[in-house]
Image: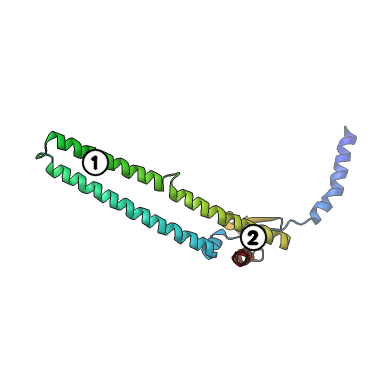
Amino acid sequence: MKFYKKSILLIFSFLLPVFSFAQIEIGFVQSERIRAEYEEFKEAESELQLEFRKVQFEFQTMAQRLDSLKSAFETQRLMSSPERRREQEAEIVNLETQVNDFQTQKVGPQGELYQKQLQLETRIIQKVQKAVNKVAIDKGYDYILDSVSLLYGKPTHNLTDDVLYELRRLTEESTNSN
């Protein structure tokens, strides 16, 4: 058993200098800056904002119609026949259901806006990942971290400009090939 321990200690002492010479290259990118400066992110954000405004306008129109229907019902309630009141109540319930369905369909967790956002962001994030990989390989980095959780990073290891350059180059390539 002693021989075994001494052997491991001897092997470890020979390998320690080898490990200390192997340098790990770590860089970082500022994802918020990439999001702010990369044109495709801006375009996707604008497109989503436009879609959201359309949905919001449509929702507000439906909600106003519902409010006016409820208001008219309340003012005419006492003067209406029981049959007419049931019809109006059914119309209000129907419109409330339509408003709720619209909201779920458009802005719910599985709604159209969420799906569109996911689709746009996935495509862009794949491009960012491709650019990060290219920069890492070209510059010999072992790891590239996101600065969101980084407390300090030496400015020489900030690869954000390189990634933005690569993204613009990839965008130009895809534009020229189409």
Task: Pick whichever, 59 or 133, lies toward us.
Answer: 59
Residue name at image x 85 percent, y 47 percent: 13
Residue sticking out furthest to the left? 79
2 and 1 marks in contact (CB < 8 Å):
no
Q: Which residue is drawn at 9% across and 40% down?
A: 79
How many numbered markers are drawn?
2
The residue tagged with tag 2: helix, strand or loop? helix
Which residue is nearer to you in this view: 103 or 3?
103
Q: In this view, does 127 lie above or below 172?
A: above
Residue 161 rendering spot, x and y as whole percentages = 61, 66
Could you tell which of marks 2 and 1 lies nearer the N-terminus? 1
Q: Which quadrant of the rendered structure holds the N terminus? A: top right
Residue labelled with disc 1: 92
Q: What residue type is labelled 1?
A: Ile
Mark 1 Cα-neighbour bin, 10 Å: few <14, some 14–19, many ≥20: some
Res. 131 mark: 2
Badge 1 marks a residue whose secondary structure is helix
Farthest residue to the right: give it: 3
Query: Horizontal and vertical percent for residue 85?
Result: 16, 37
Between residue 146 and residue 154, name the one nearer to us: 146
Say what amino acid the circle numbered 2 marks: Ala
Can you give x and y, in whole percent of width and height, for residue 40 in the image?
53, 62
Q: How is the image coloured?
A: rainbow
Q: Can the viewer see residue 79 in this picture? A: yes
In the picture, measured across the screen, residue 63 lies left or right of residue 77, that is right
Residue placed furthest toward the top: 1
